[in-house]
Amino acid sequence: MPFFEPIEKIDPKHLDLERARKSLREELEAIDFYQERIDATNDESLKKILAHNMNEEKEHTAMLIEWIRKNDQTQDKMFEEHD
């Protein structure tokens, strides 16, 4: 993960938030990949497997969002305001 500032100047809490946000982006991207594959295949048994895998990525996404909410008060406030 590239940083724009010297890593030793970055608060460790902020490094963990960056890790969580990067992971969230990756999970969302994986959901999109699975959805494309589900839409593209005509094999119903494969669709079922891919949908299962996609839903696991959605679970991971929810877990990351909850962690971010607990560790970033401003982000949590934004979720509450736009709930």
Image (tube, rainbow, N blue to C red):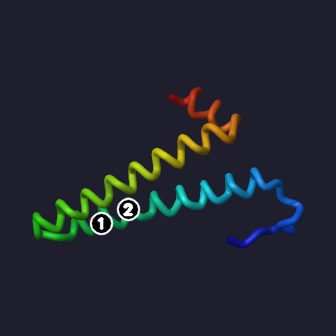
Picture coordinates of residue 34, whole percent (x, y): 32, 64
User: In the image, is residue 77 above or below residue 7?
Assistant: above
The local secondary structure at tag 2 comes to: helix
Q: CA distance from mark 2 to mark 1?
A: 6 Å
Image quadrant of residue 20?
A: bottom right
Residue 59 pos. (x, y %): 40, 49
* Vertical arrangement, residue 83 with respect to residue 45, above or below: above
**Residue depicted at 68% across the width and 57% down the height:** 18
Name the residue located 25 percent from the left edge and 64 percent from the top edge: 50
Quarter holding residue 7: bottom right
Q: Quadrant of the N terminus?
A: bottom right
Residue at label 1? Answer: 36
Tell whether 17 sits left or right of 51.
right
Residue kind at label 1, given as amino acid type: Glu
Q: What residue is disc 2 on?
A: 32
Are the residues flagged by discs 2 and 1 in contact, CB closer than 8 Å? yes
Tag 1 secondary structure: helix
Q: Position of residue 45 (x, y in %)?
A: 12, 65
Count residues near mark 2 (Cα–Cα under 10 Å), then give few for <14, some for 14-19, many for 20+: some
User: Residue 61, labelled with which disc?
Assistant: none
